[in-house]
Amino acid sequence: MRLEFLENGPIRLEGARFRIRLGEKEEVLEKPRIFLCRCGGSANKPFCDGTHKRIGFQAEGGVLEVEGD
């Protein structure tokens, strides 16, 4: 799995299948990548809706790679 912290933007999470649990709600997504909000302003949390561009969010970029099971 690979998480990329996009400069001044969201977290791009790459994989094949994601299981997201928020409280009692659970959602399974079968996508090659998803974008998670990092600015705190998204109306569709935990997903990015592009609000970071409008509010001028700034943060360094980086990568986290998880190997193995």
Image (tube, grey):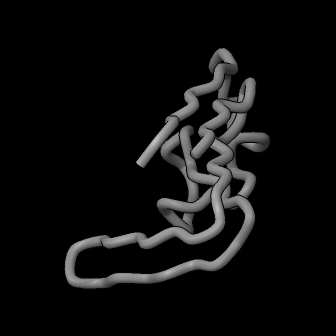
Between 26 and 52, which is closer to the camera in this rendering? 26
Q: Is residue 6 above or below residue 24?
A: above
Q: Position of residue 20 (x, y in %)?
A: 41, 70
Which residue is pictured at 74% across the width and 64% down the height? Answer: 32
- Residue 19 falls in image quadrant: bottom left
Compared with residue 49, is residue 55 higher up or lower down, i.e. above or below? above
Query: Looking at the image, which is closer to me, 47 or 50?
Result: 47
Q: Position of residue 29 (x, y in %)?
A: 58, 78
Residue plotted at (54% across, 49% down): 41
Outermost residue, front side: 68
Q: Residue at x 72, y 31 (%)?
A: 6
Residue 16, quarter of picture: bottom right
Image position of 39 with respect to 21: above or below: above
Name the residue furthest left: 24
Q: Out of 49 and 10, give the one closest to the viewer.
A: 10
The x, y position of residue 14, in whole percent, is 67, 52
Image label count: 0
Q: Residue 44 placed where, x, y %?
A: 55, 68
Residue drawn at 49 percent across, 81 percent down: 28
Relative side of 53 to 18, left or right: right
